[in-house]
Image: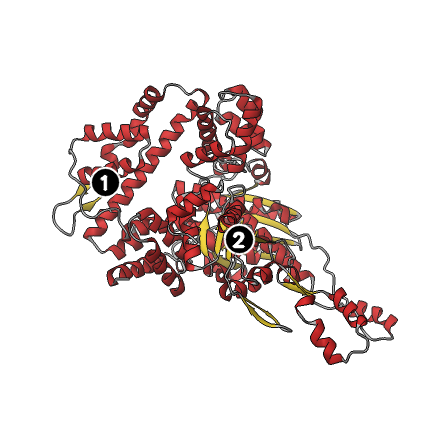
Amino acid sequence: MTTPVAERLTSLVAALRAHGIRVGTGETVDAAQAMAALGFEDRELLREGLAATLLHGIAQRPVFDPVFDLYFPRGVGAPEPGTADRDDLRDRLAAALAANDEALLARLAAEAVDGFGGYGSAPGSDGWSSYQTLDRVRPQTLLARVRADVGARNGSSGFADRLLDDEIRRRIEAFRGLVATEARRRVAERRDRDQIARRAVAPTADRVDFLFAGKDRLAELRRTVQPLARKLATRLAARRRRAARGSIDLRRTLRGSLSTGGVPMRPVLRRRRPARPELVLLCDVSGSVSGFSDFTMLLVQALHDQFSKVRVFAFVNRIDEVTGLLEHGAADAAGLGARIQAEATLTGWHGSSDYGVALGEFAERHGDAVGPRTTVFVLGDARTNMSDPNLAAVRLITERARRVHWLNPEQRSLWGTGDSAAPEYAELVEMHECRNVRQLGALVGRLLPI
Amino acid sequence: MFTSVDDVSVRLAETGYLASPSVATTVFLADRLGKPLLVEGPAGVGKTELAKAVAEIAGAELVRLQCYEGVDESRALYEWNHAKQLLRISAGRDETWDETRTDIFSEEFLLTRPLLTAIRGDEPKVLLIDETDKADVEVEGLLLEVLSDFQVTVPELGTITATRRPFVVLTSNASRELSEALRRRCLFLHIGFPEEELERRIVRLKVPGLDAALAESVVRVVGALRAMDLRKVPSVAETIDWARTLLALGADSLDETVVRATLGVLLKHQDDVLKAAAKLDLDAL
């Protein structure tokens, strides 16, 4: 293998590692062998070959594809200069969308970025923007035209026609992706490719910060709830199995040994009473952390058959039970936050969160929800808006409950800054940093009672 | 075994398995690099079928290890035939202990299980380890030795090394995260739902009597259902079932009544049926 190709491969691997994908040397060697076996004629085969050798799971694919596009680009430099006319480009785009011609769409994306995505003129400050390209070309406004086009071409095909709009929307979405890829490629040609690969490629869903996740990222996260819950359930079951065997029940072993003349032939293991763990969740659902709370509530709800009882309370500055809302809302995860806000009494005099009042109200009104078999999880950033953190209420809850854990979606270095009362609370209960799905999965798997 | 990726696609197609480019590429590499193939994906997209198709092409024997919770060494690797050993001991009463001992731990008394079967012998074999995620973590440790060196150690007989490496396919539904060590030894292949065009070809191949236009509508409706947020989205197997149902009903085009009556073939939960009916503008059930 020639040096430049090997170098290209190793920098690709380095970029993947920077995104937290663990690729060993052995896999890199495999990838090189795959490249040698596949050749360079077909780029898509090369992509699949490298994915097969370097990746270990489907969750890594959304990171791999853009990185691959950067290191093994479709072309180099500007495309064949097309007409710089916006209407003409839109005409051709509409025709390509109607025909669903993927190769043509890729070429049009390159042309669009070349024609409408460039900004700046001085070297160093110029670049290519997918946002600007899409803003000028406006592919989403082509829907009606494409629909008419397809109708004219194929005639009506009956029932399936009602699906056409969604299909066209998916094609337009794919085109937007192509434009983004192309813009990244053009930028990478001007600047350092390694840096673009690290910065401009979005991280895998399980590493997205809850607090900074946008709407579609949160929707993507919600789709991971069920698989994650299933994984955690098997992990809990395994922990339970392991905990059920092990220690020897001395009294019953000795009793059994009487029939063999006092020689303990058959050790009897202690049988655990099937503990029925109960779970209470206290969730801050104020705007700043609601993404995190929603996700965790859905996760716990998906795990509910692992526990004898799960009760969920939501608060902003007043607290209310929302267990019922969660149960029949299993089908509609997206509307959960809005439904909680609408149907539960969460705010009193003002709309900002107040941990002290809410926790105090919980201890007072719902104190019977917490007993010696209960594990309590508090979810929130512990930002009390400068009001009294009400440590007495927390102390009361910790005394009653079996365990209390606090999951904080802020990074640890920010605890205690500004109006955060995290250090005070952390003295009373175990507080864990829980910024993304990966951390949440690990914590839930470890902390949930068995 | 294969000369090129295209060769893989063509020969898989001959056995009735239509492969996407990613499947063909990965199978080609697994053969070339001699590495096991780890296949993940939703149920009913043809993970197990892939192994069968490869076995058919290679004219190889398919050795299958079905994993389940509690599968262990004696089910996966080998076991001594105790009953036969006892018979042998009682048959040779006059022998010395040394003679008996060397005799009862010989090949004759060994019961080979799938993993050992796959690496013994000279004829080509395809080893299918199905639903690897159902097995306990301990079994993974066992697989590591077998899959990296293709050898098995039987204390009484010594180490048995494969003279001819089998083509290994592991499948997983991802109900448990397989260990990193196992993943490292394998090529990773995710078989997702096929592209529209490929799925159309699959339907035409598996349900030959179906009208081409109807097949296209079928695939488009299934594609729309997959885009919805359902508890269990229909897989390729369900698409084929649906196409067969439509053929059996003698429907020559899709309309609301037919779709409503047969939605149960595609969707397995009542919530999903209701949701899909609402999204597809079917009248209330």
Q: Quadrant location of residue B142?
A: bottom right
Label 1 marks which chain's residue?
A
Q: Could you tell me which residue is drawn at 84 percent across and 69 percent down?
A: A255
The amino acid marked with disc number 2 is Ala
Mark 1 crowdedness (10 Å alpha carbons): few <14, some 14-19, many ≥20: many
Can you say which quadrant of the picture contains the N terminus of chain A?
bottom left
Instruction: Give the label on residue A395, or none.
Output: none
Residue A25 visible in the current orientation: yes
What x and y, as percent, mark residue A59?
43, 50
Is the same chain shared between marks 1 and 2? Answer: no
Can you say which quadrant of the picture contains the C terminus of chain A?
bottom right
Instruction: Give the label on residue B60, or none.
Output: 2
What x and y, as percent, mark residue B71?
64, 57
Q: How is the image coloured?
A: secondary structure
What x and y, as percent, mark residue A198?
31, 55
Label 2 marks which chain's residue?
B
Left or right: B230, with A92 as reference point: right
Left or right: B185, with A49 as reference point: right
The residue lying toward the viewer, choosing from B24 and B66, is B24
Q: Quadrant location of residue A140?
A: top left
Left or right: B76, with A423 as reference point: right
The amino acid marked with disc number 1 is Ala
Pointers 1 and 2 in contact (C-beta within 8 Å): no
